[in-house]
Image (cartoon, helix red, strand yellow):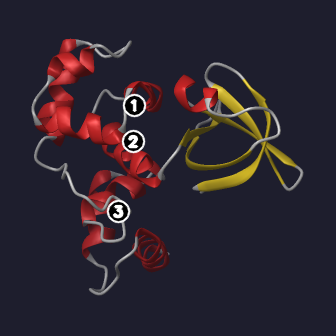
């Protein structure tokens, strides 16, 4: 899984960037707001979510780990795909998305192209209780739900991801530690 890239911007478009990382060019889907911040030749660090399907291999990129983790929560909602989740996060900051979902603001979500009223209601219903507004959004202490969502994004079924997360030893703090332990114990 490619989770973060650091490199040089080779090309940009409305919804993607081409990033050179030690001679390898990665095309990463990004929001227009993110793309507009960088010029050709700029150094960029981008947090990514990798989607591998039979007909496509895609990277979705975000400015912060906080945005990536909120993206994972959004795509865990049935009916919300990675493109729609990225559009939601591209329209405003992760804090604003989180606050509006917690307040139940369906109108805020429906302003995003591709998000209808039913999808917005489903996002609010499923995420309202699981989002936390917090001064420290570094993600150093994560719940099992974050791990379950990460495992699901890697292709594990929900039940299997829950079983893997529940079987972890206590004391693991970072997402990297939890994910590594979950993947190691599942082999």
**Residue 105 occupies quadrant:** top left
Badge 3 marks a residue whose secondary structure is helix
Nearest the camera: 3 or 108?
108
**Residue 67 occupies quadrant:** top left
For marks 3 and 1, the one nearer the N-term is 1
For marks 2 and 3, the one nearer the N-term is 2
In the displayed structure, 37 sits above or below 49; it is above
- C-alpha distance separating marks 2 and 3: 13 Å
Q: Quadrant of the N terminus?
A: bottom right
- C-alpha distance separating marks 3 and 1: 18 Å
Counting labels gives 3
Q: Residue at x 56, y 41 (%)?
A: 61
In the displayed structure, 161 sits above or below 84; it is below
Q: Which mark is residue 33?
A: none
Q: Which mark is residue 85?
A: 1
Asked if disc 2 and disc 1 are in contact, CB closer than 8 Å, the reply is: yes
Left or right: 38, with 141 as reference point: right
The crowd level at tag 2 (other Cα within 10 Å; few <14, some 14-19, many 20+) is many
Residue 25 is situated, as x and y percent measured from the top left of the image, at 82, 42
Badge 2 marks a residue whose secondary structure is helix
Q: Residue at x 40, y 32 (%)?
A: 89
Q: Residue at x 19, y 51 (%)?
A: 133
Residue 38 is situated, as x and y percent measured from the top left of the image, at 68, 34
Which residue is tagged 2? 71
In the displayed structure, 161 sits above or below 49; it is below
Q: Residue at x 34, y 29 (%)?
A: 80
For marks 2 and 1, the one nearer the N-term is 2
**Residue 98 occupies quadrant:** top left
């Amino acid at each position: 899984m490619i989770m973060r890239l650091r490199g040089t911007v080779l090309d940009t478009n409305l919804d993607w960037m081409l990033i050179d990382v030690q001679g390898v060019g990665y095309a990463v889907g990004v929001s227009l707001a993110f793309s507009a911040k960088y010029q050709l030749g700029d150094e960029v660090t981008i947090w990514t979510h990798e989607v591998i399907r039979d007909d496509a291999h895609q990277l979705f990129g975000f400015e912060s780990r906080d945005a990536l983790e909120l993206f994972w929560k959004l795509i865990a909602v049935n009916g919300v795909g990675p493109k729609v989740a990225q559009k939601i996060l591209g329209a405003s900051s992760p804090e604003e998305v989180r606050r509006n979902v917690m307040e139940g603001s369906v109108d805020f979500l429906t302003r995003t192209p591709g998000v209808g009223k039913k999808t917005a209601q489903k996002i609010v219903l499923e995420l309202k209780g699981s989002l936390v507004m917090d001064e420290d959004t570094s993600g150093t202490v994560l719940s099992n739900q974050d791990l379950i969502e990460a495992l699901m994004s890697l292709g594990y079924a929900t039940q299997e991801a829950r079983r893997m997360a529940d079987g972890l030893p206590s004391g693991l703090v970072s997402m990297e530690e939890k994910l590594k332990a979950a993947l190691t114990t599942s082999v």
